[in-house]
Image: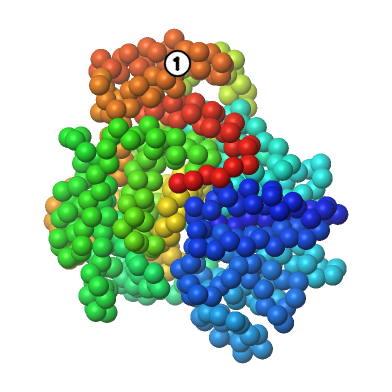
């Protein structure tokens, strides 16, 4: 697991070492163990390494003596690297170590840009072919988008630059960016940037399961690969058990994140079972809560899961007075606004994981998307016939419903969104189109959630905020065998996570199986109440002077929304106010991202 960076331009000079050092410094928190950058006329390739597989080997960029001119860097894990190494060795290739990424130059030499089709894992790969007459840059990410890769192409000089994190990408000289005009609407409508866009015009993210080919002086040509398929391994519990055991093996300490819900509970129970059966030390589990008495605490459920699984349980209590600082740090690490208060909890949780000596953490992310766990996914099939169901689905994704958004917008901004269209409109149209060609609504929503919502909303956040503390988050639910299995189930089995409840019947406490669904997040409505720890921060971000300067939100209506919430707190008003504040803070933070400076955790 690492942070990677690089550039490719025809006929350009060698990049300045100071510039490359500035890029690396902004994402060094994710790769504190080793740092190397190579460069030449018109190109650079670098890595900040978090040593997980073969900690004593694996020097990046990867180079093999018998393949001069082929260089590669990897962020992530290639789980089938031993199998690939054996197959490549049989073809005459030799390797200096047993690190997973060492196979990449040889794999490319054998298969060219199709090399990524042979990888099983979570990865973002950059490979430079500098051989005479073959010069090209190849970029690839895994099928689910677990490891993001951010790109900038300059149409004026034909250069392409990339980095694992947006702040690092912005430290490259020549990266021209500006906040997207629709960024505020997108945040309120979908809670984060949507599709391959980021909140910055000029910065895109490679879509899941895609390979980009960059030839000298040309823009990246992006192609989606076919999915990496795995053979069926039995029932839901068997498939998940296999993946948890596979991902629990590491040469560094491994723990599990235990929220107290079904998904993380299953991962926890199976990982603890694996530890006992292999005579390994007991599994450590981590749960985050906030000091004081706050509604919707899941701590009791998490303790129940830990007791049942016999883990060493860590209940991490964060002081609410720290929330303002946490928000600034998360916005800076993400590089773009994310309206879900879960960002603060995620950042603080992985801080505790790292401080307790763990480098790998197993999580339950991805289960809701694959097994129909969200309320909106259960409601869609039961909605009346007609196109309105898709609009209602899009509204369920929002931080602020459409009518409230339009009420808050200035006349000019409302007209702009009406003219250009909202991300919510594009989502609804995609869902209607899927239904029109014969997909049932659960299949249509599952495809949307896994292709677009999951990588943009969950996985970029999880990657950035775990790696802010140099922790590798591993996701058993998003491995090919589980994905293939979930998609093969009948609709009834993947509605409301029925298959997962059946799988957990003998593994989890009854209280966890019976409890209502609840996201792992921050009790923002209570914390925005009078005297709450978030109130002053939100008031500052939504001051009339700020909003008038931005020109998108009517300051008087935002003030009235805050006043009504303080009189009668509601989750909807709180989330809307929080989202507006996050966007305002991001617009302030992004201005400083153009200064080449480190970004310490």
- Using the rendered image of the protein, determine whether residue 450 is visible from the camera's viewpoint: no
Front-lying residue, 383 or 525: 525
Position of residue 541 in the picture relative to residue 100 (left or right)? left
Q: Please determine whether, in this image, residue 68 is positioned above or below residue 89.
A: above
Image location (x, y in percent) of residue 28: 53, 53
- Residue 133: x and y in percent read 85, 68
Q: Residue at x 84, y 70 (%)?
A: 132
Q: Quadrant of residue 66?
A: bottom right
Whether residue 155 is visible here, answered yes or no, is yes
Say if 62 sits above or below 157 in the image. below
Determine which residue is flagged by label 1: 543
View extreme (top): residue: 556
Q: Position of residue 423 (x, y in %)?
A: 54, 34
Residue furthest out toward the front = 18
What colour-coding does the image apply? Answer: rainbow
Instruction: State the SS at label 1.
Output: loop
The vertical placement of 574 against 555, above or below, is below
Q: Nearer the viewer, residue 593 or 414?
A: 593
Q: Residues within 10 Å of mark 1 (few under 14, many from 20)?
A: some
Picture coordinates of residue 309, whole percent (x, y): 19, 64
The number of callouts visible is 1
Occupied quadrant, residue 182: top right
Left or right: where 274 falls relative to 346: left
Q: Image point 44% across, 40% down: which residue? A: 330
User: Residue at the spot x=30%, y=37% of the render?
Assistant: 522
Lateral position of residue 111 relative to residue 355, left or right: right
Q: At 19% across and 47% down in the image, what residue appears? A: 299
Left or right: residue 68 versus residue 572 is: right
């Amino acid at each position: 697991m690492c942070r990677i960076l690089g550039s490719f331009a025809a006929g350009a000079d060698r990049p300045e070492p100071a510039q490359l050092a500035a890029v690396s410094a902004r994402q060094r928190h994710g790769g504190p163990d080793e740092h190397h950058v190579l460069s030449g006329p018109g190109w650079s390739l670098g890595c900040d390494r978090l040593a997980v597989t073969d900690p004593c080997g694996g020097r990046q960029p990867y180079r093999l003596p018998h393949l001069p001119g082929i260089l590669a860097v990897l962020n992530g894990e290639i789980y089938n690297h031993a199998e690939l190494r054996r197959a490549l060795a049989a073809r005459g290739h030799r390797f200096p170590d047993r690190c997973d990424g060492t196979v990449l130059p040889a794999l490319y030499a054998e298969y060219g840009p199709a090399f990524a089709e042979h990888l099983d894992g979570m990865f973002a790969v950059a490979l430079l072919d500098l051989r005479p007459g073959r010069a090209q840059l190849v970029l690839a990410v895994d099928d689910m988008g677990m490891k993001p890769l951010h790109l900038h192409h300059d149409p004026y000089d034909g250069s392409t630059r990339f980095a694992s994190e947006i702040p690092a990408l912005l430290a490259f000289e020549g990266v021209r960016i500006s906040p997207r005009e629709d960024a505020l609407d997108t945040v309120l409508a979908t809670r984060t940037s949507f599709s391959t866009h980021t909140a910055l015009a000029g910065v895109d993210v490679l879509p899941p399961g895609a390979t980009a080919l960059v030839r000298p002086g040309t823009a990246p040509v992006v192609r989606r690969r076919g999915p990496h398929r795995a053979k069926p391994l039995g029932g839901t519990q068997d498939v998940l058990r296999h993946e948890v055991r596979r991902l629990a093996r590491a040469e560094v300490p491994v723990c599990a994140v235990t929220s107290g819900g079904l998904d993380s509970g299953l991962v926890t129970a199976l990982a603890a079972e694996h530890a006992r059966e292999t005579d390994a030390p007991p599994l450590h589990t981590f749960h985050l809560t906030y000091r004081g008495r706050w509604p919707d605490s899941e701590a009791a459920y998490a303790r129940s899961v830990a007791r049942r699984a016999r883990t060493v349980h860590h209940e991490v209590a964060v002081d609410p007075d720290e929330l303002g600082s946490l928000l600034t740090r998360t916005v800076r690490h993400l590089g773009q606004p994310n309206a879900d208060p879960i960002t603060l909890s995620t950042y603080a949780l992985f801080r505790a994981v790292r401080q307790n000596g763990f480098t790998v953490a197993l999580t339950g992310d991805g289960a809701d998307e694959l097994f129909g766990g969200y309320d909106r996914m259960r409601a869609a099939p039961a909605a009346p016939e007609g196109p309105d169901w898709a609009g209602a689905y899009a509204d369920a994704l929002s931080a602020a419903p459409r009518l409230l958004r339009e009420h808050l917008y200035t006349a000019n901004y409302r007209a702009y969104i009406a003219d250009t269209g909202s991300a919510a409109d594009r989502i609804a149209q995609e869902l209607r189109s899927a239904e029109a060609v014969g997909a049932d609504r659960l299949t249509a929503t599952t495809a949307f959630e896994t292709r677009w919502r999951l990588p943009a909303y969950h996985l970029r956040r999880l990657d950035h905020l775990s790696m802010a503390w140099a922790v590798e988050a591993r996701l058993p639910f998003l491995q090919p065998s589980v994905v293939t299995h979930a998609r093969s189930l009948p609709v009834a089995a993947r509605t409301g996570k029925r298959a997962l409840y059946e799988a957990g019947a003998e593994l989890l406490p009854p209280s966890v199986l019976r409890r209502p669904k609840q996201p792992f997040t921050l009790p923002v409505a209570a914390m925005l109440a009078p005297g709450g720890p978030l109130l002053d921060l939100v008031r500052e971000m939504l001051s009339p002077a700020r909003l008038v300067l931005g020109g998108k939100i009517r300051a008087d209506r935002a003030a009235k929304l805050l006043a009504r919430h303080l009189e009668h707190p509601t989750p909807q008003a709180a989330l809307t106010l929080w989202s507006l504040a996050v966007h305002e803070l991001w617009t302030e933070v992004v201005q400083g991202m153009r200064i080449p400076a480190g970004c310490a955790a």
